[in-house]
Image (tube, rainbow, N blue to C red):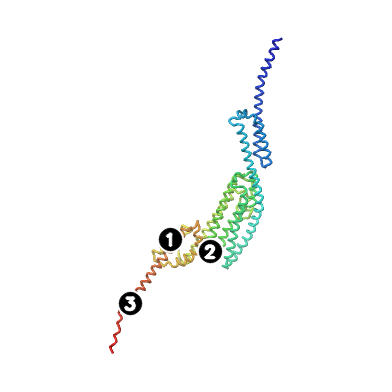
Amino acid sequence: MMSRLHLLPLALIFVCGFLIPIRAQESDFAVKREFEDRAAVLKTRIDAATSTVQLDSLKNELDGFELDFQKHIVFLDKALYPETFNSRVKNLRDMFEHTQERVRTIQIQGSQIAEMEGTLQTLAYRLDTLSSQRDRLFLELQQNKANVSALRESVRRLQNMLQSQDKLVFALVDSIFMPYGKDLAKVSDVQRDALTARLAGSNLVARVYDIASDNVRFLEATELQGKDFATLIDHYQQFAGRWRGLSDKMRAFAATVPPPVSAEPLAEQHGSRTPHGSPLPGMTQTMQVDSLLGEWNTRLRKTFWSAIEREFSSRRIILSPFSDAPGFSASIRTYVQTLKNSGEDPTVFVEEVWKARIDREWRDALTREGMLGKEEYAALDKLVSELARSKIDVKFLLYIGMIGVVVLVLWWMLARKPKPPAASAA
């Protein structure tokens, strides 16, 4: 009996020695599991935060999380290997700071967007008002063709109106995109939806298409003078440059927008002359505007070079055919060389056409980049001027020679005239 009583403490010691490590292992496992669970919940809530109120609450929770597990740092460093307790907490704090910056940016952009709403409405209204003025001016252009001065005034007003449309539509572009920054791939889902709605509501692509179409129609509707083209060339180049910037933004944004299930044609949104496609800025719409800009450029240049050719042909000067700047330059050089070789009088070509018409009326347009440019125009002008000078030099020498011959004849005649007899002495 006594032996059994002596064995009981030994059994209790054995059981306690066996159970204590098990309980310690269960406690460590619970610590790690609680740490992982709370860290995952914090990560999810930080990533989903959309307001400063939520972030303030999360900051307190993050501080409490770090404090609660500080006493287990040695164990967690081993359990999280190759990570550590401090690295895991730092990742959560970095994520918190990133979300905080994102929420702050969204709030700033939200206030900017709200301020822009009035601007967008004003710009859209002004564009619609100019559209009605455009139709009236095109009608005046047709009615005033018989009256030169009235026609010129209509052309001037219509040009000014088209340029005003350009400025307004690209001001509308800036107002729509400016609040979202340069990198459209980083906008949030809420911002993406708002931007999509504004692009669709403003009919932006349709408006750009209409304005480009108006410019093509303008080239078809009237006969232009030489001094008109410098402004028209500048107008096209500025429009094309702005459109390239806008289309890049639209393509970047379209890449972030899921394709719509269905979309109304742009023509139904903003008139029959607009291209068909969805209201989102997709590839189809931008390609259609690109195509129209190509037509605008082609028609502008064709009208330009045809009008210059008429300056020569109307005075019976036949140049080699040309349809662009290199062709025009080669044609002038060939004609100048032909005049030099033939000895033909260049007065009409130099004085009546080049100096009186080309240099006075067309120089500003010809010296634009993308046309002849300043250097090539200066080279052609020098070539033509030398042609005139060489002809003047020949005439001058001929006149001098004729005067010299007359002087010699008079001198010879006077020298042979007999002297009068001397008077006889008284």
Rendered residue at 66%/51% (across/down): 115
Q: Position of residue 220 (x, y in %)?
A: 56, 60
The N terminus appears in which quarter of the rendering? top right
Q: Local crowd at mark 1 within 10 Å, few (<14), some, or many (≥20)?
A: some
Q: Local crowd at mark 3 within 10 Å, few (<14), some, or many (≥20)?
A: few
Q: Position of residue 258 (x, y in %)?
A: 62, 44
Q: Is residue 278 placed above or below 305 in the rendered structure?
A: above
Would residue 93 appear left or right of 397 to someone viewing this image?
Answer: right
| Three-letter code, disc 2 | Gln
Q: Is residue 156 placed above or below 40 in the rendered structure?
A: below
Q: Position of residue 332 (x, y in %)?
A: 44, 61
- The label on residue 48 is none
Q: Earlier in the sequence, mark 3 or mark 1?
A: 1
Q: Local crowd at mark 2 within 10 Å, few (<14), some, or many (≥20)?
A: few
Q: Secondary structure at mark 3?
A: helix
Q: Which residue is mark 2?
A: 225
Would residue 369 appear left or right of 392 to someone viewing this image?
Answer: right
- The label on residue 411 is 3
Residue 149 figure quarter: bottom right
Q: Report if the CB atoms under discs 2 and 1 are less than 8 Å apart.
A: no
Looking at the image, the residue that sits furthest to the front is 426
Rendered residue at 51%/61% (across/down): 364
- The label on residue 333 is 1
Looking at the image, the residue that sits furthest to the left is 425
Q: Earlier in the sequence, mark 2 or mark 3?
A: 2
Q: Secondary structure at mark 2?
A: loop
